[in-house]
Amino acid sequence: MKKTIIVYGTTTGNCQEYAEKLAQKLGVSDVKNVTDIDADTLETYDNLLLGTSTWGAGELQDDWFDGVEKLKDADLKGKTIALFGCGDASGYSDTFCGGMSALYDAVKDSGAKIIGQVAADSYSYDDSESVVDGKFVGLAIDCSEDEDKTERRIDAWVESVKGEL
C-alpha cells in the first residue's frame, strides 16, 4: 500500500472511532484529526481517507469547516481519495450522512481519483446529499443501526478499496 493517511473530524468521538477501525483493518498507522494537519501534510501522502460526521440539517462536522479549505489549498492531483461519513438514518433520515457531500465537493475536481462509492439501496433513509447516481460518494456509516450490518458494510468497503490504495 502506498503512503496513506486517514483524516477525520469528530465531535462525539464516533467518527474518530470509525477512522481508527478503518486504520486497523487497512493497516494504516497515520490517523489524524483534521485540526492537526495542513495542506502541506496532505500533499506528502498518496492516499487520503477522509471522514466526517453529519450534524443538524446535513451539516459538515465543525472541525472540517477549516479542513475543507486545507483540501482546496492542497495539490491533490494524482492522489487516491476515499470518503466515509457517520450519520443517523433513523433520527435524521432526510439528511443521512449529508456532511460527506461537502468533502466530496471539495475534492471532486482536484485531479484526484475518488474511490469507495457504496450502493445506496441497502440503507433505509429518505434523502442524502451524499448520493450521486444511486451511490453514496463514500462509505456511509449508520451510527444508530445494528452493529452487525455496520461491520459487514465496513468489511465490504475495506475489501473494495484496499486494492486501489
Image (cartoon, helix red, strand yellow):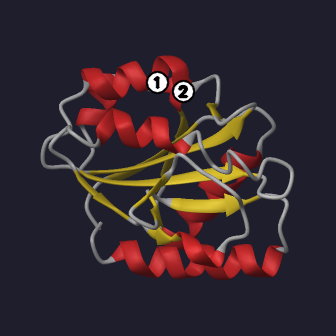
Location of mark 1 (residue): 67
Q: Residue at position x 68%, y 45% from top?
A: 95
Quadrant showing the N terminus: bottom left
Left or right side of 106 for 57: right
Q: Which mark is residue 117?
A: none
| Residue 150 percent coordinates (x, y) | 72, 73
Q: Is residue 40 above or below residue 151?
A: above
Q: Tell me the SS state at disc 2.
A: helix
Q: Are marks 1 and 2 in contact (CB under 8 Å)?
A: yes
* Number of numbered markers: 2
Left or right side of 81 for 89: right
Circle 2 Cα neighbour tier, 10 Å, few/some/many (<14 / 14–19 / ≥20)? many
Q: Name the residue type under label 1.
A: Gly
Q: Name the residue type under label 2.
A: Trp
Left or right side of 2 for 132: right
Location of mark 2 (residue): 64
| Residue 55 percent coordinates (x, y) | 72, 34
Q: Tell me the SS state at disc 1.
A: helix
| Residue 116 percent coordinates (x, y) | 40, 66
Identify which residue, 113 or 74, lies in the foreground: 113
Q: Residue at position x 37%, y 74% from top?
A: 162
